[in-house]
Amino acid sequence: MARTTLRFPALPPKMRLAPPDRPEAEVVDGLKERFGLRWDTVQARATPWVEAVRSRPAPFWAMESLLKEYPLSSAEGLALMRLAEALLRVPDVETAMALTADQLGRASFDTSDGSAHPVLAGLSSSLIGLTKKLLPQDAAQAGLVQRLGAKTVVAAGVRALQLLGRQFVLGRDIEEALREANSQRKDVGSLRFSFDMLGEGARTEEDAERYLASYRHAIARIAQGVDPQAGPEVSDGISIKLSALFSRYEESQRERVFEVLLPRVWSLVEQAAAANINLTIDAEESERLELSLDVLEALAAQIAQHFPQWKGFGLAVQAYQTRALDVVREVGRIAQTYRLRLMVRLVKGAYWDGEIKRAQELGLAHYPVFTRKHHTDLSYLACAQALLDLAPSIYPQFATHNAGTIAAIVQMARERGAAFEMQRLHGMGESVYREVLKSEGIALRVYAPVGEHRDLLAYLVRRLLENGANSSFVHQLADPAVPIATLLASPLQRPGDEGPALPLPPALYGPLRPNSKGADLACLHHRLPLFEAAERTQVPAIPMAERAAVEEAMQALHAAFPAWESTPVAERAAILRRAADALEARMPEFCGLLVREGRKVMADAVAEVREAVDFCRYYAMQAERLLVSETLPGPTGESNELRMRGRGVFVCISPWNFPLAIFAGQVVAALVTGNTVAAKPAEQTPAVAQRMVELLHEAGVPRDALRLLHGLGETVGAALVADPRCAGVCFTGSTQVAKIIQRTLAAKDGPIVPLIAETGGLNAMIVDSTALAEQVADAVVQSAFRSTGQRCSALRLLLVHERIADGVMKMIGGAMQELVVGDPVRWATDVGPAIDAEAHANLVRHVQRLEREARLIARTPMPAGLAGDYIAPVAFELARIEDLREEIFGPVLHVVRWGSGELASIDAVVDRINALGYGLTLGVQTRIDGRAHQIAHRARVGNVYVNRNMIGAVVGVQPFGGEGLSGTGPKAGGPHYLLRFCGEQTLTINTAAAGGNATLLAGGH
Ligand SMILES: Cc1cc2nc3c(=O)[nH]c(=O)nc-3n(C[C@H](O)[C@H](O)[C@H](O)COP(=O)(O)OP(=O)(O)OC[C@H]3O[C@@H](n4cnc5c(N)ncnc54)[C@H](O)[C@@H]3O)c2cc1C
């Protein structure tokens, strides 16, 4: 078929929808106002279906039986799910044995209470018993007989999971899936299918091209079996995921989404339109929701021009989004504007857990999804009604396995005489629909995933979660203990539980400490004020302090100490809280400065302001906890009390890479413990520091309790540290400078002064062969290149198991090609410049050395004409760990393979990392939990991150700081930090001194 090459100019972002973080109760009230339904008739329609399904329990091999016996809320269910996620991709038997032993060995598969399906109970208990007997804790040390047995169990496990997977996949390729579909049609002639080509989202262009080819092939095959005259309603169709067709399907890459992704989608649209079949764009995460509507509109405009008769184009809408009804209206508007008939699949949504976590991490005011199951159900019905009312512009396709929801849809559709179809997932809801089809004679389409075993894992886990969730209809349907009345209860009338069922993100840390407010940059409402502020920001010039100013400041700070120290701790804490509130309110202004002066991209700037806010609130809370006098036990006739107090003038020296968060964290920790503070910011970023000092003064810190002294480390910094009035130093920066400070302190006469030093790291990530390449690639790219690699915690040394190394490196290299180097003021930029010309020159020198001595894996392309201190992210393979000699503070990743020779074992790898002498952060990517704990135990590092990125420590959640060459501790943002800023005093009073022990004699002991 001849393809047209269309260009899609990017539509500018617009505020189509309300912000995603509206109060849930407000949204629910709105839904209730507009929606009504007689629920008794819905119940009456659905009850016989449920009774019939329950009278025929699922066979023992069905997913429902398995999950009933081992629900996901149990350790056993969780172990099974985790095994299902990983086992099929593990490349070697030894690791597969270790993984199986790890997951199954710790759970207790006791089926003796007789509650389970008798056949499954018998089978599973003997199989699992065998597993436990044969799979040793340490597979490497087991004897031959045991190892042979273990291999058999693992082989059986692999086979069982393949069979489990097959329940949800129609075929390994489209040909097999079509054959299977036709065979199912022999039983139910009216059945239609929507095929879905399985796989993780694309991380590289190569992935995207592969998915595109597989969609093209699938559409061509589907088209062969379809009569173009029949129409998309009755023919098989295809479902596509946009994230599979472009690795950067993100709001920040809007221009490229239109330039690269849309022509790809268009090529599929042309094919589907020519075959006259349904092409549906699946719904993904909420951060892509607005963008997906723009994509829809751009495609709709072209379809209206090129294929105005085609009625098969469509998308999925998720009802669990609080904006779902707005989305339906918007889709209706687009259909009407372009005079198209769109097919809209209404689903409830498959990424609920991820949405909740993201909102918590971003510190949003409210969740973008409902937090009560019946609110999702209510929203689904309200959206269904809206879709039915949009006929003929919309052909609604209702995807649900919930009998109550199905009955409600049938009722609403019948009342309107509207055309519609129902949809279910392959492997789910068969029994319910068997009954529905018997009594209602409606159209049904099956969503049919197609793929090899490796590709189905993520999908399988989603379905396991869905089937195993306590709130899920399919789960409750399989549980006879749930009464039918409960199963089919109305989502409309549940008084008294309208608010969120989970603590809102601001309340994540309990009543004593509000979480800092964040922003969802994918949302224009949140993004606009921040970028506008960055555009306007002018960085003021801050004069350097003269030598005399240092003397004057130290004198003033010394004089101010007694009064500040005597200020009640509650008052000092209140000042910090006021500062936190002010900082939060002035987020755009501070972000603007961080972008302009600190050369940060906006996401990093927002995270940094939040961290500073968190420091203020956390240390305020900790000070009130720690700085109370404690009465100690002792002999009668005396009182003993332990009190914490300030030390005097603290010198705080902070780096440019976190010019606000680290600066503020040090300063407020010293202040709240009663010290006065001489704050010396990094030479590169004095303006951010100055603004923060002004804010602290406005919040109530006396001017002479906090002085900013901007200047060179060699002069101003050195003078501050050497000053006899300096009672403590808090430093974050390089190990070399920390050593100079240590020596200066040691050399000076007078008291021994404490030094808190947080220095760099040669941070490693260990990846074993159970890890998921896509997750590894995400974690590596974020950890090594985000913030231009200029974080203390950034990944420098990646250690990948040799069995998966080639694939992982290829994926990382591919993902690196998609990063954008550029001006941090632009939202599309992933990697900004190095902080200054000197840092840039050092990095260039290091990269030049690696070009001579190591193997280049990949380098991010540099945009033409980009001038400044830019450095492209780059990855090299080294022969040995020891080839990495020093901390390289930039986007340079060093990779070493492990698994044989000197690095045959995990222990050897960890020992070699320890031998580098640093000990800040460590990443671990493994599905073997025992192995993750073993590594964490052996590693001499401060922060270990398992199966995620290794940057972005959160105050009070991941207290941050290392050991060895990486610093002295205690950890910033942790419960022991403030103690290091304090002196201690015990007060002992002989209460019997004046005349004797009256209390004892009076019997009051
Ligand atoms: C044909 C088909 C296509 C699909 N395509 C997509 C797609 O493109 N994108 C997508 O995201 N999903 C898709 N799904 C998956 C769909 O979202 C799930 O099938 C759905 O979660 C199950 O809904 P149900 O009505 O069958 O089950 P029910 O058990 O009635 O509902 C489960 C729903 O409730 C939500 N829920 C659970 N607990 C809570 C809570 N405490 N608060 C609020 N909500 C809660 C779940 O997240 C889930 O969405 C598709 C499903 C089908 C059948």
Image (spheres, rainbow, N blue to C red):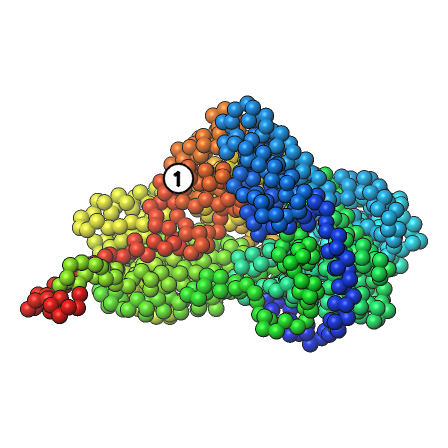
Image: 874 above or below 601: above
Residue 531 visible to an observer of this rendering: no
Q: Nearer the viewer, residue 276 or 558?
A: 276
- Give the residue type that dot 1 points to: Arg
Image: 629 above or below 903: below
In the image, ligand 1 is in what quadrant?
A: bottom right
What residue is drawn where x is 56% and y is 44%? 110
Residue 116 visible to an observer of this rendering: yes
Judge left or right: residue 413 versus residue 709: right
> Callout 1: helix, strand or loop?
loop
The x, y position of residue 866, in whole percent, is 58, 48
The x, y position of residue 197, in whole percent, is 75, 45
On the image, numbered disc 1 is attached to which residue? 940
Q: Nearer the viewer, residue 924 or 372?
A: 372
The x, y position of residue 765, in whole percent, is 50, 39
Judge left or right: residue 528 versus residue 180: left
What residue is drawn where x is 73% and y is 56%? 54
